[in-house]
Amino acid sequence: MLAELNELKVYFYDQRNKRFIRSVENVSLEVEEGTVLGVVGESGCGKTVTALSLMGLVESEPGIIGGTFFFRPDDEDTEEIESTILRRLCTKENYRKERMLNLFCGLDDYVQFEQSPYTIIKDSEKWLRRTNRVMELVRGKYISMIFQNPGQSLNPFISVGQQLQRTIQRFHTEMDKYEIQVYAEELLRSVRLRRPEVLMASFPSALSIGMAERVIIAIALCSDPRLLIADEPTTGLDTTNIHRIIALLEELQMERNLALILISHNIRIVSTIATDILVMYAGIVVEKGSRADVIRTKRGPQHPYTEALASSVPNDSDIKRGKRLREIPGSVPNNKKEMDACPFLERCPYAKGALRRKCRSACPEPVEVSPRHFIRCYRFYS
Amino acid sequence: MKRYYYERELPNIEKFYVPLSKRASVRDVVSIGFGLFVVSYLVVFFVISITNSFIKDPMEIDISRMFLPPSLEHLFGTDYLGRDIFSRIVKGTEAFFIPGIISISISTTFGLLFGIVSGYYAKYFSKIIFYFLNIIDSIPRIILILLIIVLFNPSIYLIMAFVGFSSIPKVSSYIKSKVDVLKRQHFIEAGKSLGLSESSLIFKHIVWLSSKSVLVIQATLGLGETVLIETSLSYLGIGVQEPIPSWGNMVAMGKDFFFQGKIWLSTIPALVIMFTIMGLYLLGDGLNSIYNEKVSR
Amino acid sequence: MEKTVEVQNLFKYFYSDKRDAVIKACDNISFSIPRGKTLGLVGESGCGKTTIGRMLMRLIEPDSGYIFFDSMNLTGMKEKQIRPLRKNFQMIFQDSRSSFNPRMRVSETLKESIHLYRDVKGKELRDEILMCIERVNIHRAMLSHFVGNLSGGELKRLEIARVLSIDPKFIIADEPLSLLDMSIQSQIVNLLLEVQINRNISILFISHDLRIVRMLSHTVAVMYGGRIVEYAQKSMISENPLHPYTQYLWDPKSSDFYVRFMESGCVYKNSCRLFHQKGFPYICSKQQPALLEYEKGHFAACHFAHTG
């Protein structure tokens, strides 16, 4: 087990309307070494916030208010990190037998809940300072992230080569200038970019969007991380580029034994390379399991949202007949009110009759319908 | 069969564009409230003074009532000739009200015109318009005014028209930068493809919807500046002359009696000047802060 | 059948700043769209399809060639003459968020577009706006909201409503689906299907996704490097794609080739699978293949189209 996130809760406070927005509620995920976890969901369901909180980049008030994130950094350096972090953490609970460290340690000391009136008290400044001290050792070096919209992720004022070299310098302090340059060119070649010498001198504005995406992947990989989080790397690209980038990610992942978290709204793309899939809706995980379980071709349990997502992508026979596509009526609820009912209730084609009353009563808990396959739906309560 | 996309909770949170009423902070509300109060009393005073009603005659000399301190009958007291100071203050608004309107009308109208032309048709007109505007802008304003007064001895209306004229470059450059940015926005191209005429695009979309804030703010600040200039000039004895009251010359006349203990003769007009200018500038500042604030605070 | 739009021999080249590189956005493009039919234009980003759309809307001028609309020659006309004609052809943009002035409300936007070409007032206007909104399935309570507050899918639907309120004869849809989530894409695709069925409008549907284009169009043209490399009815494109690029678009998971060769000859040879398989035949480097008719109504530009 490389990384394990348990019961992550991220709330934001809306000043104007004086209420909490439940951005992420009780999300848990696990990533094994060398596997690909696909996170699927529409825009606004909290997947980007989850990714940012894994990197410790959530800064708004109050932000992360609950959960633990156990992560196992590299074996060789673990002793060093352990001692520095442990000295700061000073508790044994935040350290597990398998040499995993809780990167959100001490959260309980900074957060308090009060039930009535519903308030959350959090010392955000101190918490941010502490998280930053811990995360700085880990971020970029062991966990890397690539963001949406590649055109805006590169600094437009300095050349591609300089950006790459500066990042390499930060992580590989033992290399000298010449070695850094060689390593940079090697990185660019590893992401299948032709003529890296020319590319190093050019500026981001000269790159096409596919090339910019590859440069960003190269920058993210320069420290040889154990976990790469890719937040919607393919949105806005055309179909041919999407397949090339996904193929590239798969190759890199296999070469370097990298664990990858691939976030997207397109379940078909994710299912091409994912080993496990997580489906999110309105801030909660509605289905979690291996790829075979979640994307099934024969009959088996599946959350109605996953079903709807999978069928909104046309397959070949649908295209030839030119029929209407199956669509999910309505849109994602964006006023995240109290979780007093299943959030998918209004759009669910199965919520009828007696079942509907159950769906309206409370948010369903995850049910293990088969080994390591969890679904949050009252249809599968036995 | 009609199918509606039923939205369970109709979104009522303004995510992106927040209308003004929700964006204001307490400080802005106070500034704008104060500024509006100032504007309203200016208007009221002006109307009273030109209709010559409700107040005592500001020119009526009554030596028996010299140097009366503020009381219920004479709200601000009387001056060295027994004239009621409050009614003189009211009358004093006449000195700058109409000239101020003239000044801001000139600066905003021509500023808008030059700004639009040099912004929208930048290729042809931008350089040449700004060449002339920069010449105007480079001469310090007070020197210009004093020069004009010495040379031509004009009335206050002409002086203020000139002040307005000298503010054109600033307004133009604000409008031009706004137009420059907006012209490149995609919705202008989309509007063109719909078939909107150029004049409709410029006046409705660029000016009215997106730039009127700049004009309103420049107008309020311009009015504040007018008050400042007019009171300074009449304090120096150049503007409105005795016995016609102006806040500036009241301060000037009253200063001789300040150390005799009759402080209200010059202090009260001075406070009124400060109050008014501060109110106008705060109005401009508050409006600026709510119009131009980025959405997320 | 009466041809609504006809394009002949369009050329548009862009020159880089230093005048040393030329980008051939449109290289001898010709096609026609009959009344009430949809032409799908497919290609990667940078192949010139957006340029064609903007030239048809007369937002940019072609270097040479002709554009006919309802047998009227649009090419030489000035802006003043074209403006009244814009009632007949309209465009849906890729990024709908930036096509609206965010300070206007939804009802005001529709009012503006209706008033451009028709004089409707009062109650009739309100009914018209309501009808436009309901046709695209937006809830009527959204009418008073500011445009800036709508979500991506709603904005796209609003843009379609705005274009339909003008009632044009020809619509150009420039990559309408690319920035939307998959679930919203299906809603918009269904909406476009409805529009096609209920109204007799010709549509030019520009996209990079051949599958969706195949669903929505009657005829498909595949573009690469500024040229049309295949042109056929929809059934023929899926059953018998002749050009290797079309075959690649159907199944992008097949492996990728790139070899750098001279610029002359076929535009596709650098990435062409057939070029590699056949050992780099000379004819592909020498001559750009012409669009030849291989079956009735099925054109392809490849020297080896009948093989592979």
Image (cartoon, coloured by chain):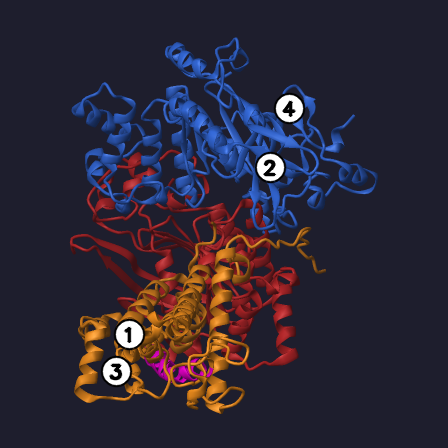
Q: Is residue A194 visible in the rendered structure shown here?
A: no
The x and y percentages for residue A259 are 45, 23
Q: Which residues are magenta?
A: B87-108
First of labels 3, 1 by sequence position:
1
Residue flagged by tag 4: what amino acid is it?
His
First of labels 2, 4 by sequence position:
2
Q: Are marks 2 and 3 on the same chain?
A: no
Chain letter, colour red in render: C
Q: Is residue C107 left or right of residue A329?
A: left
Q: Nearer the viewer, residue A6 or B84?
A: B84
Label 3, label 1: how far apart the Cα atoms are: 21 Å
Residue flagged by tag 2: what amino acid is it?
Gly
Label 1, label 4: how far apart the Cα atoms are: 72 Å
At a point 55% along the width and 68% down the height, the residue shown is C164
Label 1, label 2: how far apart the Cα atoms are: 54 Å
Callout 1: few (<14), some (14-19), or many (20+) C-alpha neighbours within 10 Å? many
The C terminus of chain A is located in which quarter? Answer: top right
- The colour of chain B is orange
Q: Main secondary structure of the magenta part?
A: helix
Callout 4: few (<14), some (14-19), or many (20+) C-alpha neighbours within 10 Å? many
Callout 2: few (<14), some (14-19), or many (20+) C-alpha neighbours within 10 Å? many
Q: Which residue is mark 4?
A: A373
Report the disc number at residue B238: 3
Q: Which residue is mark 2?
A: A283
Q: Which residue is mark 1?
A: B167
Q: Nearer the viewer, mark 1 or mark 2?
A: 1
Label 2, label 3: how far apart the Cα atoms are: 71 Å
Q: Nearer the viewer, mark 1 or mark 4?
A: 1
The x and y percentages for residue B236 are 26, 78
Q: Chain of mark 1?
A: B
Label 4, label 3: how far apart the Cα atoms are: 89 Å
